[in-house]
Image: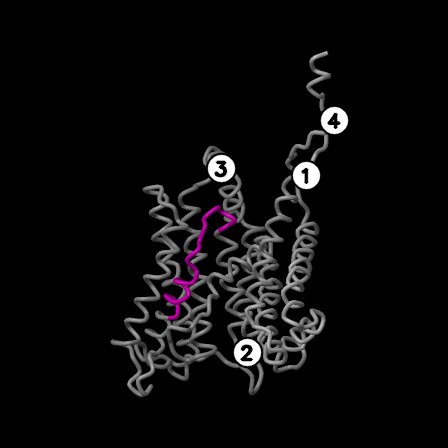
Amino acid sequence: MMRISLQPRNDVSLNARIIISVIAALAAFALVAVPVSFAGVSPLTAYWLMFKGSFGSMFAFSETLTRATPLVLTGLAAAIAFRAKLWNIGAEGQLYAGALAAVGVGSGLLSLPGPLLIPAIILAGIIAGGLLMIVPALLKLRFGADEVVVTLLLNFIVILFVQMLIEGPIKDPLALGWPQSVPLADAAAFPKLFARMRVHGGLIIGLVAALILWITVSKTVLGFEIRAVGENKPAARFAGVPVNATVLKVALISGGLAGLAGVSEVAGVKGYLSADLSPGFGYSGIVVAMLAGLHPLGVVLAALFVAAVFVGADSMSRATGVSNYLADLVVALSLLCVLVGGFFLRYRLKFERGISPLQAGE
């Protein structure tokens, strides 16, 4: 009689994690091919059109990079928090908090020249996002509150608060009744990286943030403490790691990165704050972090993949008539495949020949 058991793996290489993520993406496309076929379109044609729509021209590639910029930052926010087992589901609200702070500082509150105004709105956005994440972290440490619930509910509170403000105190009187905030000063706008294209300096900030976070996690004492807290809090506390202080530091970093994503969208793309600033970048950042295996540098590649899927799906939809919600399906299935692959990275199936009940009776 064959018996199957799960045996934990002692260590998983980075190469194995990368391979699992690639296989997950390919498996997702294979699964999505079924509904695409039912829609009357060849999956190969649809995927080719998606690729052309996201990488087929310099303009398409710039749009993909523009879409990837906030995903890099929200992906990093989720990755650093999840490493410490701090489940930050509130990056969407933190993004809006950072955008609101950027508008507050950059629309005339401070009269500073451009070289100083841009750092000022960046700092304001980081502080706003970080402080918003501190609230659920403190509730978790002090009262044992579930940070998943608290951060999720804070999303709705912040977004509704923003909607109230852009319909009232900070509404742009020149917007012809359209609900949007007063614009940022020209000096607060992020520079464009290419002429006549939307990709902006926020992309450089995201790449630098990913590099700094990777160095922090892998090369510093704080990074060791974050890994220790994430692996085993009681053991980390016994070894002298300041668990509560580490969780609060992670909360500030995670919220600050999500707030920076809001600054990036306001100062780099729109120039003002509106209720539709984010189509769900905070939630998509969770998918990006999981696809990257919580690796900061992997977040950049995962963000580029997710952005390419969404941008390419829009182009494919216009050419074939297939709904661009196909992108959501691809991303969701990629996440599910990564979770399944991650399970088999942590455990291996062990087949053992057991003793049947009849043999045991003998």
Q: Which residue is mark 4?
A: 353
Q: CA distance from mark 4 to mark 1?
A: 16 Å
Q: Position of residue 268 (x, y in %)?
A: 47, 77
User: Alpha carbon of mark 3 to alpha carbon of mark 4: how far?
Assistant: 39 Å
Which image quarter: residue 61? Answer: bottom right
Q: Nearer the viewer, mark 3 or mark 4?
A: 4
Tell whether 354 sits left or right of 185: right
Q: Would you place residue 27 above or below residue 225 in this image? A: below
Amino acid residing under circle 1:
Arg
In percent of width and height, residue 277 lies at 42, 73
The correct choice, above or below, for 241 with respect to 36 in the image is above
Q: Earlier in the sequence, mark 2 or mark 1?
A: 2
Query: Mark 2 = which residue?
Result: 199
What is the magenta range? 82-99
Q: Amino acid at mark 2?
A: Val
Considering every residue shown, the one lying at the far top of the view is 362
> As displayed, is residue 137 above or below residue 188?
above
Q: Disc 2 versus disc 1: distance between alpha carbons?
A: 44 Å
Three-letter code for the amino acid on which mark 4 is drawn: Arg
Q: Quadrant of the N terminus?
A: top right
Percent across and percent down for residue 15 are 70, 52
Answer above or below: position of 247 versus 187. Answer: above
In the rendered picture of this protein, how many numbered marks are placed on residues?
4
Residue that numbered label 1 is attached to: 348
- Residue found at x 48% / y 52%: 81
